[in-house]
Image (cartoon, rainbow, N blue to C red):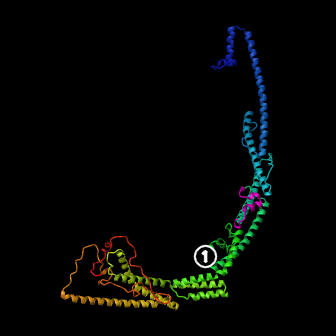
Amino acid sequence: MAVVDAQNPRVGETTCGSLLQKLQEIWNEVGESDEERDKMLLQLDQECLDVYKRKVELAAKSRAQLLQALSDSRLELSSLLSALGEKTFTGVPEETSGTIKEQLAAIAPLLEQLWKQKEERVKEFTDVQLQIQKICGEIAGNSNLSESPVVDESDLSLKKLDEFHSQLHDLQKEKSERLHKVLEFVSTVHDLCAVLGLDFLSAVTEVHPSLKDSTGVQSKSISNDTLSRLANTVLALKEDKKQRLHKLQESATQLIDLWNLMDTPDEERKLFEHVTCNISASVDEVTVPGSLALDLIEQTEVEVERLDQLKSSRMKEIAFKKQAELEEIFARAHIEIDTEAAREKIMELIDSGNVEPTELLADMDDQIAKAKDEALSRKDILDKVEKWMSACEEESWLEDYNRDENRYNASRGAHLNLKRAEKARILVNKIPALVDTLVAKTRGWEEDRGISFTYDGVPLLAMLDEYAMLRQEREEEKRRMRDQKKYQDLQHTEQEAPFGSKPSPARPVGTKKVVGPRANGGANGTPSRRLSLNAHQNGSRSVTKDGKRDLRPVAPMNYVEMAKEDAASHISGTDTVSASP
């Protein structure tokens, strides 16, 4: 071996051969004999043999220890597999496969993996058993758990774990159902307390302290005792709600009857609108907070007592108020009634006490309804009467305007009167057709009802006939006036003929122009004036309740106050210039 090492020395390395060669060089230099050299070489061989023996013994001992460790590892592996419920495990080496260290190296990670799996499995068992124990305590009403669950480490199989999980799932389902019932009960108690005006926290705290809103959902009590007490609380509150609603509805009915009897205004009724809105509601329909509070019911009862005391003293006031409403409807419809007699009859009925107040007011309401129907049937005719009277007013104003000799002067507001005159002529031209339509509608109305259509006590057809007659007389008067003027002009011309015509003064050139006959007359140059209803040209005819004719006032000639401006600029755009108005 030394020779081999000496023959193949590695450069820079110290081997047995290199050392032996070095020793021989030293011996050669010293001059050692061959005997000494053989003796020393034998000694070196013996020492090497002893070293090998010790190494073999240590290797044998180490092998025995490794075999024991391998046996223990296999035993531990089998125990873990049994506890975890694993019949086979992938990666376990066979006893004859590989060296001892290879087998140990193969088993070590498996053991480590199984130990970790066991620890996790124990933790899972602990968690699931702890949850089971906790839920069982909550159902039993004992949520304070002092002992931790004991895990049987000899059976950590998945089958056993699934059994615990199945048990936990059933318990969690039961807990969820119980918690849902508890929350439903608590919500119902909250709504009922809000409607009844009660303290919700006090109500649920009496059942169990954990039911307050400040506590979490999962921490609320779900025991059988809590569910039973909550159910009883809900029943008691519902019964209280039913009784209060019945009491409030009785008071609200009386309140509405008194309101209707005394014709209470809407402003006062709105003060108790939150009470009367539940007059026909069922128990389940009343959900507004405070709507059945005791103080609200007491206020309603107090208001009923107050109105009941005022009932007798306000009957006359209410009756006269309805009578005034009835008179107003008739007045707007221009229907004449005997108001004094009606009021005297109401006083007699109330003072005699022979008629119930409700019956009297109901009868007056019927009269008001009939009056409204009557007014509605007359509306179309009355609207046309108003148009007719308005047209008569414009006709009267137009005649006054046409008689004004200075109407074409460039005064302030003259252009506005010109515009109004044009509109008035258009409106006046429509009067005959309007009168004809009014007569036809009035006759149709009278035929349908078999009575005469009166306007403030005067038959409307008589008014229209009188207007037509006056209009005809006025047209004839106008015709006579025109003929007379023509005759006078002719006489004046004959008198001036022997002396020659009188020259007219020169007309100054300027911006002002006088409106000719076309501006307010027909094509022949004569003004087209129409008669108004009254003879004084100050307004149109109307009839009062006692049958007397009076005059409807008209507006002044100038309606709009204009700013300072040159009125001539407005007049210059009119029709042809005429020397005579």
Provide the residue span drawn in magenta: 194-217
265 on left or right of 116: left
The residue at 77%/26% (across/down) is 58
Name the residue nearer the viewer: 485 or 275: 485
Position of the C terminus by quadrant: bottom left
> Is 214 located above or below residue 360 in the figure?
above
Magenta-colored stretch includes residue 151: no
> Is 67 located above or below residue 345 in the figure?
above
Place of residue 36 in the rendered image (x, y in percent of width and height, measured from the top left): 74, 10
Residue 511 sits in which quadrant? bottom left
Name the residue nearer the viewer: 378 or 15: 378
Place of residue 46 in the rendered image (x, y in percent of width and height, measured from the top left): 76, 17
Dot 1 falls on a residue whose secondary structure is loop
Name the residue nearer the viewer: 212 or 519: 519
The residue at 65%/71% (across/down) is 274
The residue at 35%/70% (across/down) is 564
Residue 49 at least partly seen: yes
> Is 192 located above or below residue 166 in the figure?
below
The residue at 80%/55% (across/down) is 142
Residue 398 sits in which quadrant? bottom left
Place of residue 391 in the rendered image (x, y in percent of width and height, measured from the top left): 41, 83
Magenta-colored stretch includes residue 211: yes
Position of the N terminus by quadrant: top right
The amino acid type of the residue labelled 1 equals Pro
Q: Which residue is mark 1?
A: 265
